[in-house]
Image (cartoon, helix red, strand yellow):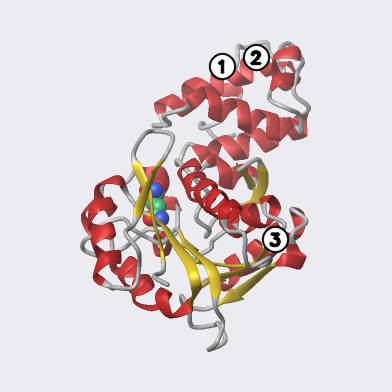
């Protein structure tokens, strides 16, 4: 029995294994995860226990005094052990909600953030106003789980989406996510580096990206959950964080159809610089900035000059 999990060492003398109730396991886990540096120990404990029991979180509270089955307890023990090393909860349960949809996630893939919903909302709003062409070709570069292209396809029936991802295993996961969310017929996932896997003449009404944009300096300051567990490929953007942003802006104009729109997620403090980078290409109308729910600048977008 590991000392990192509910076990004999922490149980009252006379208590049998099967006497560990939902309440006891929750209380124990919350204290344990707090001690190991989780910033959301109660939420973590609830999500993990619901997962171990195969129930909804709300059902923990309606079954507070129900003892755990031995298999549930064994499963919980493994989950808590991993969470105590600050492995992200999303990896432990294997999925993450984004834009009201379910996405498979796991070690090796960047976990979708609510911040990125700002990009999806902005794209959908601009798409709604674009009366022609009937079919909207959308490209998403650095797609990860596929959260951007899949949410766009699910909410915009006119969209035909292409997504590019460098990591082969992540490509497969994005493909499964498209199938799971019933948009696989309108979402094509390609493996490769940025624009490389596209056919030479492929053009788009929208190009979107949540590129890596964390600066070298900030990489060392990221929370341990992110820094030690999430893929640096999806995070590291070089000295000023904008290495990939510059490469995207260099090629995007030739890939955009007439009146096409480029949108990128960035960090708030990069917004003005990125707006300037758009301007320096000489190929875009003045860029707009969309803010996330926390009020920070999060998306810089602009229309290609006609
Ligand atoms: N906002 C992300 C984070 O630090 C970074 C995302 C990115 O580099 N694309 O969690």
SS at badge 2: helix
Residue 100, position as x, y percentages in the image: 65, 40
Whole-number angstrom distance, CA of label 1 to CA of label 2: 6 Å
Residue 159, position as x, y percentages in the image: 66, 62
- For label 3, the crowd category at 10 Å Cα-Cα, with few meaning under 14, some 14 to 19 and many 20 or more, is some
Q: Can I make out residue 119 in this image?
A: yes
Whole-number angstrom distance, CA of label 3 to CA of label 1: 49 Å
From the image, which quarter does the N terminus lie in? Answer: top right
Give yes or no for contact between labels 1 and 2 (Cβ–Cβ under 8 Å): yes
Q: Is residue 180 left or right of residue 204?
A: right
Nearer-the-camera pick, 233 or 24 = 233
Residue 233, position as x, y percentages in the image: 41, 65
| Disc 2: which residue | 23
| Disc 1: which residue | 27
SS at badge 3: loop
Residue 35, position as x, y percentages in the image: 40, 26
Which residue is at 62% across, 59% downward? 131
Look at the picture and state if 40 lies above or below 289: above
Q: Can I make out residue 10 in this image?
A: no
Quarter of the image for residue 277 reads bottom left
SS at badge 1: helix
Which residue is at 53% across, 53% downward? 126
| Disc 3: which residue | 158
- For label 2, the crowd category at 10 Å Cα-Cα, with few meaning under 14, some 14 to 19 and many 20 or more, is some
Q: Earlier in the sequence, mark 3 or mark 1?
A: 1
How many circles with numbers are drawn on the protein?
3
Quarter of the image for residue 190 reads bottom right
């Amino acid at each position: 029995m590991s000392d990192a999990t509910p076990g004999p060492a922490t149980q009252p003398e006379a208590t049998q294994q099967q006497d560990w109730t939902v309440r006891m396991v929750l209380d124990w886990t919350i204290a344990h995860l707090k001690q190991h540096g989780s910033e959301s120990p109660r939420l973590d404990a609830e999500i993990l226990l619901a997962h171990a029991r195969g129930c909804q979180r709300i059902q923990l509270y309606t079954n507070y005094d129900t003892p755990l089955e031995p298999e549930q307890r064994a499963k919980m023990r493994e989950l808590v052990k991993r969470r105590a090393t600050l492995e992200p909860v999303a990896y432990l349960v294997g999925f993450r909600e984004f834009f009201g949809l379910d996405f498979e996630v796991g070690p090796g893939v960047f976990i979708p953030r609510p911040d990125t919903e700002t990009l999806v909302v902005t794209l959908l709003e601009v798409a709604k106003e674009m009366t022609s062409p009937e079919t909207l070709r959308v490209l998403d570069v650095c797609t990860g789980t596929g959260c951007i292209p899949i949410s766009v396809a699910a909410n915009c029936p006119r969209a035909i989406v292409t997504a590019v991802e460098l990591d082969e295993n992540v490509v497969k996961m994005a493909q499964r996510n498209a199938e799971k969310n019933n948009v696989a017929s309108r979402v094509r996932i390609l493996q490769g580096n940025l624009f490389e896997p596209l056919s030479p003449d492929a053009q788009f009404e929208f190009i979107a990206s949540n590129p890596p944009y964390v600066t070298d300096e900030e990489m060392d300051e990221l929370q341990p959950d992110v820094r030690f567990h999430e893929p640096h490929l999806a995070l590291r953007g070089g000295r000023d964080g904008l290495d990939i942003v510059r490469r995207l802006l260099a090629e995007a104009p030739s890939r955009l159809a007439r009146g096409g729109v480029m949108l990128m997620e960035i960090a708030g403090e990069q917004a003005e610089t990125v707006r300037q980078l758009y301007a320096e290409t000489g190929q875009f109308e003045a860029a707009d900035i969309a803010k996330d729910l926390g009020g920070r600048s999060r998306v810089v977008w602009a229309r290609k000059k006609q």
